[in-house]
Amino acid sequence: NSTGEQFLFVPLLSVHNPKIASRPFAGDLVLTHGDGWDTQAASKFFVYSVHPSGAYVTTPTTGAALYWAVLSMMTRNYERVCKLIPACRTDVSFSSEEAWIFEMLRRTMGDSHPDAHAARLRLAAVELEARATGDAPILDSKDVVKDYEGYAKKISAVSAFARLSPHEELDLLLLLRQGEPRHAF
């Protein structure tokens, strides 16, 4: 703009990683208008303010933070995902747009990197905290348990930035237990 501020204009579209046999860990993205985009996405784009240093962007809304986290997860930038967690937290139920964005996180379940397990667990805690009584879960509890098992098995390989504190682990287990009483932890 006229004062030298920079912004990042990002279209809000359905996104997934393509399956590329020769590059199984590529962070390539495919953006489409499918999967309920026309009915669920109230915003058609997000505008992120770029910090003057160019080191990071600021997220104007919870939905924008969730979308940036999903994009970061799909491009395997786990450190960015973990840094975005505070901006994703909310004490109210997700809007239909935010739930639709969060739903895209399921598309990363094939990523079994130790930091991916940790980042998804942190995001699962965000979803569990935001879920009001009677709200249908967005993430499948079986996937969260699978991530927790992967995290526990690979804890020595989880980066320091992604590692859950003992308090966070306990909170996640308690939240899971409240939300899904059929699991015994």
Image: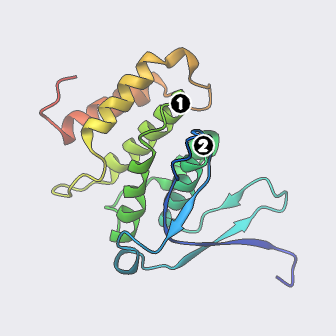
Residue 104, relative to residue 11: is it above or below? Answer: above
Are the residues flagged by discs 2 and 1 in contact, CB closer than 8 Å? yes
**What colouring style does the render use?**
rainbow
Q: Position of residue 124 (x, y in %)?
A: 38, 43
- Point 83% across, 62% down: residue: 52
* Numbered disc 2: secondary structure: loop
* Numbered disc 1: secondary structure: loop
- Point 30% across, 29% down: residue: 173
Say which quadrant the C terminus sits in.
top left
- Point 30% across, 31% down: residue: 145
Residue 152 in the figure: left or right of residue 5: left
Look at mark 1 in the image and give the residue it sits on: 113
Look at mark 2 in the image and give the residue it sits on: 76
As drawn, the residue found furthest toward the bottom would be 2
Residue 181 in the figure: left or right of residue 22: left
**What kind of residue is marked 2?**
Arg
As drawn, the residue found furthest toward the front would be 22
C-alpha separation, residue under disc 2 versus residue under disc 1: 9 Å
**What kind of residue is marked 1?**
His
Q: Quadrant of residue 142?
A: top left
Residue placed most toward the observer, 113 or 171: 113
Say which quadrant the N terminus sits in.
bottom right
Residue 95, relative to residue 38: is it above or below? Answer: above
Dot 1 crowding, Cα within 10 Å, few <14, some 14–19, many 20+: some
Q: Position of residue 180 (x, y in %)?
A: 18, 39
As drawn, the residue found furthest toward the left would be 182
- Point 59% across, 50% down: residue: 72
Dot 2 crowding, Cα within 10 Å, few <14, some 14–19, many 20+: many
Residue 100 in the figure: left or right of residue 162: left
